[in-house]
Image (tube, grey):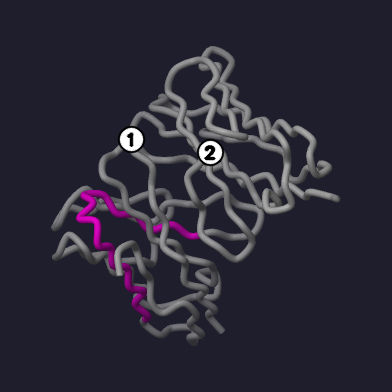
Amino acid sequence: DAGITQSPRYKITETGRQVTLMCHQTWSHSYMFWYRQDLGHGLRLIYYSAAADITDKGEVPDGYVVSRSKTENFPLTLESATRSQTSVYFCASSEAETYEQYFGPGTRLTVT
Amino acid sequence: GQNIDQPTEMTATEGAIVQINCTYQTSGFNGLFWYQQHAGEAPTFLSYNVLDGLEEKGRFSSFLSRSKGYSYLLLKELQMKDSASYLCAVMDSNYQLIWGAGTKLIIKP
């Protein structure tokens, strides 16, 4: 299926566990992004990638790790989950820096 | 610091017109985006303004004044399906999007 997908859609994990959120896009877009969305806040950029093997920090990168070995995949790993990382996580992609971003359906993560 | 301000919630009547304002203070400016987000869903792109003026796209229009750090989204002939949150986002000098918290629009019959 064409588009941008995320898995899992829902995840409950315990404090201290490692968890990886997956993101896959089929458009061959150069840019990919990870955001978190919390009530009362706008979307906040965690990490982004301009191309395979190029990643950079966003506004709130602490506690997160990303990689991009292939253009189409951009996994986000929480190395040791904390309750403050309970959030909805959105992956997005775009053709170029100033182009519109296309968002995946989101992953709702709960850390207990 | 960087800041995007938009009203938290607005209510309007089906068939009417509503204007959602957004003011911003950012380090640099490379365009302003509006996105629509229905509850429980992902944001979807509505409009992009980089030059001053009004951009019209069907029932939706977006206006930008860079000198005033101001934009608005105008929705005409409101329909119940327009009930959603509307997100304003500014691309800063590093080409990163800075997002407002969103305006929840409630449409009443």
Dividing the picture into quarters, in which one does residue A81 lie? bottom left
Q: Which residue is mark 1?
A: A98
Q: Residue furthest top?
A: B67
Residue A38 to residue B54: above or below: below
Give x and y (percent) for residue A80: 39, 78
In front of the other: A28 or A81: A28
- Disc 1: host chain: A
Q: Which residue is mark 2?
A: B34
Helix, strand or loop for disc 2: strand
Please state if A68 lies on the left or on the right of A40 as rendered.
left
Amino acid type indicated by mark 1:
Thr
Residue A13 to residue B56: above or below: below
Q: Which residues are magenta?
A: A19-36
Residue A77 shows which numbered tag? Answer: none
Give x and y (percent) for residue B49: 46, 26
Residue at the (49%, 75%) spot, across then down: A82
Q: Is residue A91 inside the magenta stretch?
A: no
User: Callout 2: few (<14), some (14-19), or many (20+) C-alpha neighbours within 10 Å?
Assistant: many
Residue A13 to residue B76: above or below: below
User: Callout 1: few (<14), some (14-19), or many (20+) C-alpha neighbours within 10 Å?
Assistant: some
Residue at the (44%, 62%) spot, across then down: A90
Give x and y (percent) for residue B85: 65, 50
Helix, strand or loop for disc 1: loop
- Disc 2: host chain: B
Is the residue at mark 2 from the same chain as the one at mark 1?
no
Please state if B7 lies on the left or on the right of B88 as rendered.
right
Residue at the (48%, 29%) spot, across then down: B26
Amino acid type indicated by mark 2:
Trp
**Distance from Cα at disc 2 to Cα at disc 1:** 13 Å
- Give the main secondary structure, helix, strand or loop, of the magenta stretch: strand
Please state if B102 lies on the left or on the right of B79 as rendered.
left
